[in-house]
Every structure is written in structure tokens, then in C-alpha cells.
Amino acid sequence: MDLKKYIASINDFPKKGIIFRDVTPILQNPQAYSYVCEKFLEYAKKQNATAIVAPEARGFMFGCPVAVMQNIAFIPVRKPGKLPRETICEEYSLEYGKNVLSMHIDALSSKDRVIIIDDLLATGGTALAAAKLCERLNAKVVGMAFVVDLVDLKGRELLNKYDILTLTEYEGE
């Protein structure tokens, strides 16, 4: 399936010079959405994942259905102050600023094999921060899955110690 048919490119969002790749049209097309979830499900099975970790908000859209279909845990990664129990936090850089992610301190253990799912791989900062949170809780990150790889931003280089699945890519656009 050509997922680019279901990805909108928005110029100068969230700031001038950025081309935002909007995956929400995938959600509006049941065939495209099912395709993405099935590919991620196959990957989670192959990696013997016991948990899906996904950053808010777009990671939730793809991570939740995969966790349900695989009958494994879904672990949300959110901005500070959004989770109600004790959390750990990790600061990271992204292509247009800095941010912080948090996860419940009791979300994972050394028994967990985690797949991190998000909508796109850009600089890799968000995924690396999520991985660090998992690893601080002694879980093993066995893979990362993204709908889109923004190749020019070289996120794979930052994440080179992890197995990565991407379903489509943009380069030089």
C-alpha cells in the first residue's frame, strides 16, 4: 500500500521551514489504518514484544490497537504532569525545540520486551527518550516502529543500536 496517499504535507507547521507530515488521514481510511496496524502487529509478534510503549498523542493512535490485537500491555509516555502516579522523566531534543517525556515508574520491569511505536521518525529524540525511560525501568527495547521515516533528519543514526521498522519515507522533500 502506498501510504503517502494518506499523509498530508503541511508547509511551515509548527514553524516556518518545517514540512509537517500529518498521518491523521490514515486514520480516516479504514484500509490504510488497518494496514499500518497489521504491519506493526506482525513486527511486535516477530520481536516477541510484551509491551507497546508510545508517546502522546500520535503514537497512541497506532500503539493502542496493536497492543490490543497482540493482547499485551500498552504503556503511555506523556508530557510531565499528565500521568497521575509517580513518574520518571527524560528530556530530549527535537527538530524544533526541546521537550520532556514521562512514564509511570511501575509501568515496566526487567521481564518486559518493548516495541516503541510512533507516527514518524525525525531526529530520533522522542524515540530515544522513550527508550531511555524503558531502559531505566530495566525493560529491553526490542524494536521501534514508525509510519514515516524523515530520512534527511537522520534519526536512524541516533537510534542505531535499536531494530527499526518504518513503512514509508520522505527524503529531500
Image (tube, rainbow, N blue to C red):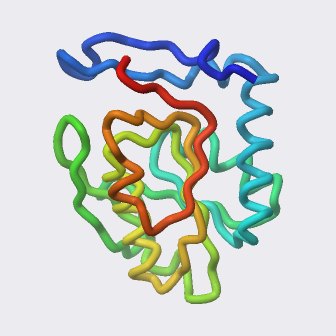
Position of residue 106 in the picture relative to residue 145 (left or right) = left
Picture coordinates of residue 138 (x, y %)? Answer: 48, 86
Q: Residue at x 44, y 42 (%)?
A: 121
- How many marks overall? 0
Picture coordinates of residue 164 (x, y %)? Answer: 55, 55
Picture coordinates of residue 25 (x, y %)? Answer: 60, 17
Tell me which corner region of the image, top left, top right, bottom left or bottom right, holds residue 172. top left
Give the vertical position of 116 relative to 86 (above or below): above
Q: Residue at x 53, y 81 (%)?
A: 139
Give the vertical position of 78 relative to 138 (above or below): above
Q: Residue at x 50, y 65 (%)?
A: 162
Tell me which corner region of the image, top left, top right, bottom left or bottom right, holds residue 30. top right
Q: Residue at x 24, y 56 (%)?
A: 92
**On-image quarter of the C terminus:** top left
Give the vertical position of 55 relative to 73 (above or below): above
Picture coordinates of residue 67 (x, y %)? Answer: 72, 56
**On-image quarter of the N terminus:** top right
Position of residue 12 in the picture relative to residue 136 (left or right) = left
Position of residue 149 in the picture relative to residue 47 (left or right) = left
Tell me which corner region of the image, top left, top right, bottom left or bottom right, holds residue 24. top right
